[in-house]
Image: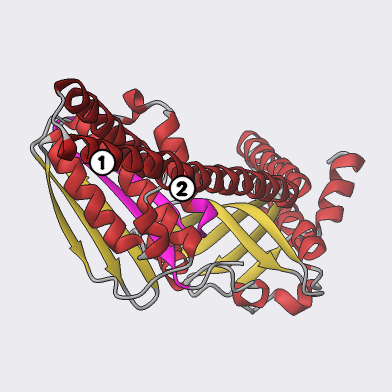
Amino acid sequence: MSSARKNRLSGLADQPVRLLLNEIDNHITDNEFRSRLKGSLHQLSDLKFALDESSIVALTDRKGKIQYVNDKFCEISQYDREDLIGKDHRIINSGYHGKSFMKNLWDTISSGKVWNGEIRNRARDGSYYWVNTTIVPFLDNDGEPYQYLAVRSEVTKLKSVEAELQKMMSQVMNIQEEERRRISRELHDGIGQSLFSLVIQMDRLLADQPQPGVEALRKQVTGIMEDVRGMAWELRPSVLDDLGVVPAIRTYIENYTRHYGIEVDLECNLRKRLEMNREISIYRIIQEALTNVAKYADVSEARVTVEDAEDMTMVIIEDQGAGFSEATAGNGVGLFSMEERARGAGGTLRVSSEPGEGTTVTLLLPKTAQG
């Protein structure tokens, strides 16, 4: 073996590999087989070296107890190897991810499937770091996992940039909503009230002396009033600010059904008001999703569910219409807007659809925002 390769193996502290190479030299007499076997071991050691140099690596048993960590794992977690071996990954658990997240992770790998996702961990000094993680289960002859290999790469800086972009996007949406509210109020209380006063004056003129020209003008003014009210409502319904999201949703659905002819079945057990940004997100996501139903679904009915559970508020908008495939979905502004509103409110948005089987939009808002 070359001195460079020996140094590499020594640096990796891979005692079992070195011992195995010695055993091959001492006990296997078939030169061709011995050469091939040693070549395979050398390739494995090179792969291990490359993996250790580029990634954060940990090996656990079927119960999640750590059996091996590489130097990069110790470096980023700030724990010595002796502090980690025999422990499970709760030692670096940040508490950021909820029970459902961890359950999904374990359900996936314990069933023999590979799991991939981003995890926020906590180092020994209390600081947090993000890692893009792939967990690969090793299966025995019965197809049951007996070990798990976790390969991670740090993405803390990327997550920081994403957080800043999210903050900026939330600020933009908040400014947009505030402008919507201001313009809506001006339309309703300013122009709307002026037009209403004009109609009253016309009614007085008509009461004194009916005039066909004034009557025609009154009809035009009342029509303009209705248009102004509709514009104010579309921009920002006052009932959303004054009474909350549930009356706003009910009123929107009534107007929606009259306009599009699509019946919407609403089920809602929300009994108290939420934070304003969450109410706005719920309202806007329902509004956008139902608009998409009217444009693309080709249905006569849809369903909206707002469920207030113990740990989260869940909103589901579903139809049994045309649906779409991921390949044809694209990245429309509507979907992007819904996703950003969900994230801005501390929640997540899922959209599932199949051609001919309808579409379901699900908004999940945890009661305690993750932080």
Q: Is residue 297 left or right of residue 191?
A: left
Q: Position of residue 96 (x, y in %)?
A: 58, 69
Q: Position of residue 336 (x, y in %)?
A: 46, 37
Q: Position of residue 259 (x, y in %)?
A: 17, 35
Q: Is 114 included in the stretch rendered in magenta?
A: no
Name the amino acid, label 2: Arg
Q: Residue at x 39, y 47 (%)?
A: 284
Name the amino acid, label 1: Leu
Quadrant of the image containing the N terminus = top right
Q: Position of residue 23 (x, y in %)?
A: 70, 56
Q: Which region of the structure is painted magenta? A: 343-367
Of the pair 365 and 8, the residue shown nearer to us: 365
Of the pair 219 and 290, the residue shown nearer to us: 219
Q: Residue at x 39, y 70 (%)?
A: 312
Displayed quadrant of residue 321:
top left
Of the pair 129 and 3, the residue shown nearer to us: 129
